[in-house]
Structures are given as C-alpha cells and as structure tokens.
Image: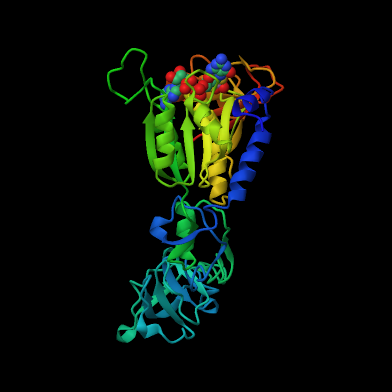
Amino acid sequence: MPTTRARFHESATLIPVAQHLEAVLAAVRGSARPAGVVEQVRLADAAGRTLATDVDAVLASPPFDNAAMDGFAVRWADVASASPAEPATLTVVGDHAAGSADPASARPLGAGEAARIMTGAQVPAGADTVVPVERTDRGEDADGPGGVHRVRVFSAPDRGRHIRRAGEDLRVGDPLLEAGTLLGPRQVAGAATAGHASLPVVRMPRVSVVATGSELTEPGETLAPGGIPDSNSLLLAGLVREAGCAVVEIVRMPDDADVLRAWISEREPCDAIVFTGGVSIGAYDVVRRVLGELGTVDFVRVAMQPGSPQAFGFLADGSAVFGLPGNPVAAAAAFEVFVRPALLAMQGRREVQRRRVRAGLVTGWDSPRGRLQLMPVSFVAAQDADGAGPEPLVRPATRGGAASHLSGGLAGADGFAIVPEAVERVEPGGLVDVLVLP
Ligand SMILES: Nc1nc2c(c(=O)[nH]1)N[C@H]1C(S)=C(S)[C@@H](COP(=O)(O)OP(=O)(O)OC[C@H]3O[C@@H](n4cnc5c(N)ncnc54)[C@H](O)[C@@H]3O)O[C@H]1N2
Ligand code: MOO
C-alpha cells in the first residue's frame, strides 16, 4: 500500500481533466446520497431544488375553453355575412368576466344570441367563435324594443377564432417535468398551471467549507504581517449555495494538523466538505497531510491550469471530500470543473455542466502545453471591438491572464474560456468555448 506522499509523487503524471471528473462523478453517484431522499415541498419553496421524480399534468391547461379577446361569444353562422353596411344584430343574453360566469347564460346560446365575454372567461355552450369588441358597436348603441340588449357585429372572424381550447397547452397526463430538472420560476409556474400544489424534490446536499491557512484573516480586518483576507470561504460557500446545496459550516483554520484533526472528529454531519488550501506539497500543507493519513482521500495533479493540485475521496462516515488549491482562481476553476458537477450529480441533476457558448477572442494569449486552460474572461460589447462576428466576444478578465492568484480580476469575469490541452496559443479573431458563470 503506497503512502499518500508516494501516491502524490506517482501522480506527477498529470491526470486528464475528463478522467478525473469521470472518477469523481462515478464515486458520488455510487455513494447514492442524498439523491435517493425525497421531500415534498410547496411550490413557493421549490425554486432552486432538484425534481426527484417525473411530474405529469393533473389539470388540463387551459382547464376550459375560454376567450382570447374581449368581445362577444357568438354562433359563427349568425355573423358569417356581417359587414359594416349590413351588420349582424344579436341579442345579448349574458355577460362573462374571467372567473365568474353569468348564471343567466348557463343555458347554451341560441340562434341570434350573443354573450359579452372578457379575455379568460369561459366560453358559453353553443358559442363557437369570439368576435373582438373592435368589430362591434360594443353593444352600447343597439338596445332593441322593450330594452332588449343587442350588439351589432360589423365583420366576422374565421369560425372558431379567439377561443383558447381546453387542453391545447397541456392535457391531463401529459408529461410536464423530468426527474433531475432544476426547478426555477418557470418550472414552478408550470407545475401550478398543471394542477400541483407541491413537488417531490431531492434533499439538499449539506456541505461544509473549510479554508486552511495561517495567513487567512477575516475580510476587512487589519492584516498581520504576511496575512491576507480569506476570500475563498466566501467564494466557495456562495458557489455551494448556488449549486443548490445547504452550507452547514464555514470554517477558517490555521495550518495546524491538530486543529484540522479535531474539526474532522467534531464537525457537524454533512454530505460533502470542500477544503481550500494546503493540498500542494508545501511544508505546511495540512490538508494533504491529515487527509492523506486516512487513506481514503487521493491527492492528484490534474492536467489543468490553474487548479492542478486536487484531492478527492471520502471520510469514514461517507462525506465526500474535495480538496481545492488555495490560490483563489485555481479554487474557482476547480470548483467549476469538479465540485459543482459532483454536487449536482449528488442531487440527481440531469445536466451537471454549466452552459457553454462559443465566443470570439479580442486578444490572444499563451496556454500551457498539455493542460486544459481555464482563462477568466469577460464579455466585450460588440461596439467596443473591431471585426465582430456573430459570436459574443471575450477578453481576459484579469491583468495577468490565468495566473491563479488574481482574485481581484476574477471579480470581473463572466466566464472561463476553455483552451484545449493541445493548444499552446490562442490568437485574436479565433474562437473559444466559454463556460458561462452566473
Ligand atoms: N513546489 C511547489 N509549489 C507549488 C506547487 C508545486 O507543484 N510545487 N503548486 C502550485 C500550485 S499550481 C498551486 S495551485 C498551489 C496550491 O497550493 P495549496 O493548495 O497548498 O494552497 P496554499 O499553499 O495553502 O495557498 C496557495 C495560495 O493561495 C492563497 N490562499 C489560500 N487560501 C486562501 C483563501 N482562503 N483565500 C484567499 N487566498 C488563499 C495563499 O495565501 C497562497 O498565496 O501551490 C503552488 N505551489
Ligand atoms: O494549479 Mo495552480 O492552480 O496553477 O496555481
């Protein structure tokens, strides 16, 4: 059994990004938690959650035939030949607003009869067409003998027009949403339309974030010599939440193996822990030392830049462990490439990758041979660039390219440009795939 140190050195051959990702995804999917745990939540609380099972419509949409225009429900045959010179005159026997039907017109419309109707109101039986109010005298000028209410129709729409048919959007039993879908406002609204009050969702993964480093200081506090603000705790906790997980603990600790050991034994139960810092081969890299002792967490180098040193494995209670580099851009990139997909896979999410777009380059840059490069980029408004093509345009977001300490520049990034392993330089006017950040 090789020691962790030995394994780390053995893996000095860089593991391809796709291979490491596949291994991580297979491991978290195999651990089967928490994707198997289903909770029923009210629609108002469902946005941001992952749907646990397929959901069908239990109510038709629209639930009944209703008017698409404000006007008059008619029998088309009565108005077919109407013209401004020879309007069709109909007796108005009802008045239908959305949500309330006039009881006077509960019976079907008879020949020569019309009912005033508003958009969304149920079309009375017998009517087959709605005449928009603009094609009538609004029923205001044509009261007939004995106060009979009448409307004059000046032209007929096509037969059947301006009626939204029951079930034309959804019929009862139609598939609505697939298991593994991220629920957002549109999905929740669709579920409401389809007759649901609540939805089955996957239990949120519970995730702790641990930043190690004796230099780490509370943001805004005066820095001791050698100190820096801890930005990764905020970065990673925010990204964890954005990935649909609950943050259990956010811990900042010095490079002290005993402190880390104590935390591991006393921590709150969780599904995953995201460490940052201390995964490289420095003398004080405690994450590597302490987790390496366990024998269940592997330390590897992945063929990417930034974000090469990576740890992944499990603690004895089954919590997944991700060890990300301390360099902030490396941590952000590695989160996108490995941790976020894994956290989404834990939720049974169908799509675990962020959206990618093809973008044109405003400037060129070098990329390390044999490594997938993730360059923080920002979108450039087309009017600010010459020779713009149909694709969006990007330029590096930081002053120093993909260097992994440029945390300030990362704040201006809209995404990571993905430069393939085999490419050593990208040129202005070329195209790259950009992983788009929210
Ligand atoms: N001799 C070698 N040195 C290094 C190698 C190597 O292969 N051989 N790899 C380099 C690469 S690449 C990276 S990435 C880093 C990863 O190092 P660690 O994960 O051990 O991170 P630290 O040493 O703890 O910190 C690196 C850097 O990041 C800053 N940092 C750490 N935590 C935070 C935080 N929470 N917020 C903001 N900034 C943080 C820290 O101060 C350091 O500047 O190793 C290279 N070295
Ligand atoms: O992999 Mo490190 O992230 O290049 O700085």
The image position of residue 244, as x and y in percent, is 46, 46
Outermost residue to the top: 225
* 54 with respect to 242 (left or right): right
Q: Quadrant of residue 425?
A: top right
87 or 198: nearer the eye? 198
* 252 with respect to 68 (left or right): left
2 or 14: nearer the eye? 2
Above or below — where is 240 with respect to 186? above
Above or below — where is 222 with respect to 232? above
Outermost residue to the front: 1
Q: How many marks?
A: 0
Q: Is residue 185 visible?
A: yes
Residue at horizontal 51%, vertical 73%? 129
Residue at horizontal 65%, vertical 34%? 20
Residue at horizontal 46%, vertical 67%? 196
287 or 72: nearer the eye? 287
The image position of residue 51, as x and y in percent, is 52, 57
The image position of residue 435, as x and y in percent, is 57, 33
Outermost residue to the left: 222
Q: Quadrant of residue 232?
A: top left
229 or 47: nearer the eye? 229
Q: Is residue 385 visible?
A: no
Q: Quadrant of the N terminus?
A: top right
Q: According to the image, what is the colour scheme of the structure?
A: rainbow
The image position of residue 303, as x and y in percent, is 65, 25
